[in-house]
Every structure is written in structure tokens, then in C-alpha cells.
Image (cartoon, helix red, strand yellow):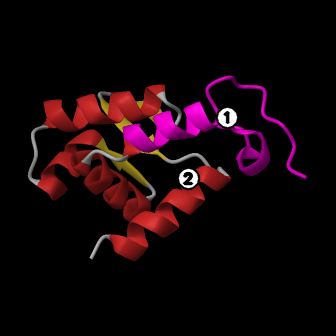
Amino acid sequence: MYRRQTVDRILPLVYHSNMHLNKLAKLMRTAGDESRLKILCVIFRERKICVSDIAKNLKMSVAIVSHHLQVMAQEGLLYPEQDGKCTFYYLPKEPFVADLKKFICKYKD
């Protein structure tokens, strides 16, 4: 069994058996937006990437990408990391995120 994390914003490691359906539904709604799926695909590929690089890669404005990233970070799907003026985002190593990656990457093409 996985050890429990103490940070409230981190998804539970044992989500398969303990995650409440309403939390799972909220995470799926958050990730299910088309723009957010595109952003997640870029982050899955790059692992850790700056907001401006995501925007350039997807030909979207920095403001729109930043908004979507903030929403996903509030739900615990991503973690921000400030480095000078640039904010990088990366994915937590959680079973839900790994399963989401498998699902998105399988059906994105």
C-alpha cells in the first residue's frame, strides 16, 4: 500500500479505493476541457515546462494558457514552480495522473 501524503492539495495515492466519486468527477471535468487536454499532452511530453513555452507550442495566448494551468493546479492536477519570472508546471507522480496520461495519450490521435 502507498504511504499517505500530508499535503491537502495532493491527490490521495490510493484513489482507486478511497477517492469519492464527486472528487473524481470534479477532476475529470477539470481535465476534460479540450484546451486543458492539449495542455496536459504538452506537459506529459515535456514533463516540466514554462507557461510561455506551452503557449508557443499550442499557438495560444499566454493569458489563456496561464488561466487553464491555474485551474488545474487548484485541483491538484499540476504543480507550479516559480523560477525567476517564469512559472513552470509539472505533474505530480500520482496514480490518477498516470492513468489520465494513459487515457489521453491512447485516444488523442
Q: Position of residue 88 (x, y in %)?
A: 38, 40
- Asked whether 22 falls inside the magenta stretch, the response is yes
Q: Position of residue 13 (x, y in %)?
A: 74, 45
Above or below: residue 83 compared with residue 44: above
Which is more foreground, mark 1 or mark 2? 1
Q: Is residue 56 left or right of residue 11?
A: left
Mark sitting on residue 41:
none
Crowd rating for badge 2 (residues with CA inside 10 Å; few <14, some 14–19, many 20+): some
Q: Badge 2 is on which residue?
A: 97
Q: Position of residue 74 (x, y in %)?
A: 46, 25
Above or below: residue 40 compared with residue 75: below
Above or below: residue 23 compared with residue 91: above
Q: Is residue 71 left or right of residue 4?
A: left
Q: Secondary structure at mark 2?
A: helix
Residue at x-position 36% and y-position 50%: 49
Residue at x-position 45% and y-position 57%: 47
Above or below: residue 60 compared with residue 98: above
Q: Determine which quarter of the picture holds residue 8.
A: top right
Q: Position of residue 73 (x, y in %)?
A: 44, 31
**In the rendered structure, which segment of residues is drawn in magenta?**
1-30
C-alpha span from label 1 to label 2 = 16 Å
The disc, 1 or 2, on the residue closer to the chain's N-terminal end is 1
Crowd rating for badge 1 (residues with CA inside 10 Å; few <14, some 14–19, many 20+): few
Residue contact between numbered discs 1 and 2, judged by CB atoms under 8 Å = no
The one of 31 and 87 positioned closer to us in this rendering: 31
The one of 73 and 21 positioned closer to us in this rendering: 21
Q: Badge 1 is on which residue?
A: 20
- Asked whether 67 falls inside the magenta stretch, the response is no
Residue at x-position 58% and y-position 60%: 98
